[in-house]
């Protein structure tokens, strides 16, 4: 159970203005990419990347951006606790999965063949 008090999740006016500004910067970068179509490709790509970075920086200083940064840092902390399988465990598990897939494929193929034999070869020939 979380003992922290729930914080308001709404977006304030300042945060909304920052988010709108970030969207404008991002759209301007994309529009600029196509508007300056005769400019060198590298210049246009750098412009779009700059727009993405600037809009990301603007979003990072909003309430939702801070919550996202907090979530990502906690996720990274939790990810460090994960016990990853060894190479041998991974290979053994992969082998078991491959064997199970082959067995189930053969089983489904056998069932398909039986239904085909029953429907096409037996039931349809009864009508003649």
Image: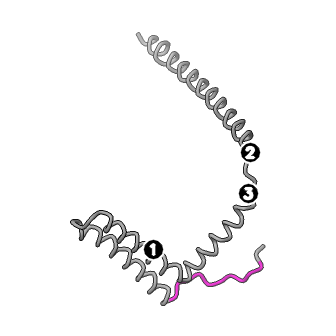
Closer to the chain start, of discs 1 and 3, is: 1
Extent of the magenta region? 3-12
Q: Secondary structure of the magenta portion, mostly?
A: loop
Tell me, yes or no, whether the highlighted magenta stretch contains residue 9.
yes
Name the disc covering residue 82, or none: 3
Residue displayed at 52% across by 17% down: 118
Q: Is residue 47 left or right of residue 106?
A: left
Question: SS of the residue at dot 2?
Answer: loop
Residue 19 sits above or below residue 74 on the image: below
Mark 1 element type:
helix
Q: CA gap, disc 1 to disc 3?
A: 31 Å
Q: Residue at x 55, y 78 (%)?
A: 65
Identify the residue position indicated by label 2 in the image: 86
Pointers 1 and 3 in contact (CB under 8 A)? no
Q: How is the image coloured?
A: one colour
Quadrant where the N terminus is found in the figure: bottom right
Seen at 45% across and 74% down, the residue is: 53
- Look at mark 1 in the image and give the residue it sits on: 53
Question: Which residue sits furthest left?
Answer: 38
SS at badge 3: loop
């Amino acid at each position: 159970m979380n003992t922290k008090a729930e914080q308001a999740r709404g977006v304030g006016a300042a945060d909304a203005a920052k988010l709108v500004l970030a969207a404008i910067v991002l759209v301007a970068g994309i529009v600029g990419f196509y508007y300056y179509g005769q400019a060198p490709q590298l210049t246009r790509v750098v412009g779009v990347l700059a727009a993405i970075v600037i809009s990301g920086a603007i979003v990072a200083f909003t309430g939702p951006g801070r919550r996202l940064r907090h979530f990502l840092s906690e996720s990274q902390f939790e990810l460090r606790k994960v016990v990853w399988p060894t190479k041998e465990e991974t290979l053994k598990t992969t082998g078991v999965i491959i064997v199970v897939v082959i067995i189930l494929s053969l089983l489904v193929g056998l069932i398909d063949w039986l239904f085909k034999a029953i429907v096409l070869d037996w039931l349809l020939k009864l009508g003649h």
